[in-house]
Image (spheres, rainbow, N blue to C red):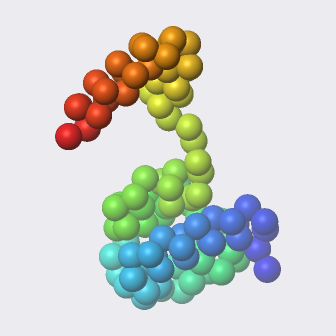
Amino acid sequence: MGTDENMQIAYSIQRIIKDKGISQAQLARMSDISQSAVNRYLNGENEIPASKAQKMADALAVSVDELLGVDLPKQGENELITIYRSLDADSRELLLNMARKLAR
């Protein structure tokens, strides 16, 4: 059985491939990694080398952070929240309206 960290990473990758409807064999082919290696990674038996994590992330069209289950807050998002919280009610409403227009 793998370490807790390996198991958490394995669970994250399993969730992604399930969400995308991809099998372990397909992931192996798409990322040019042997199926036995992918199986060991997804069973949490082996730690995934950075180069293999990048190949899998590229094949799945996700970031390495997402692949590994890392939920890093984005600096820009945190800055927007901080600014929003520092504003008065009228300024908050103005900022929200501007954001809604930009999001269209």
Residue placed at 63% from the left, 65% from the top? 9
Using residue 7 as the reference point, say whether residue 38 is left or right of it.
left
Spot occupied by residue 86 in the image (x, y as percentages of width and height): 55, 13
| Rendered image quadrant of residue 76 | top left
Left of 31 or right of it: where is 80? right
Up-down relation of residue 103 to residue 69 (above or below): above
Q: How many numbered discs sit on the rendered protein?
A: 0
Residue 75 shows up from this direction: no
Look at the picture and state if 49 lies above or below 88: below
Quarter of the image where one finds residue 55: bottom left
Kindly indicate the quadrant of the structure image that contains residue 58. bottom left
The residue positioned 52% from the left and 26% from the top of the image is: 81
Residue 104 is left or right of residue 35, and the answer is left
Query: Where 72 falls versus 25 (above or below)?
Result: above
In the depicted structure, whether residue 98 falls above or below residue 86: below
Residue 85's spot in the image, x, y percent?
Answer: 56, 19
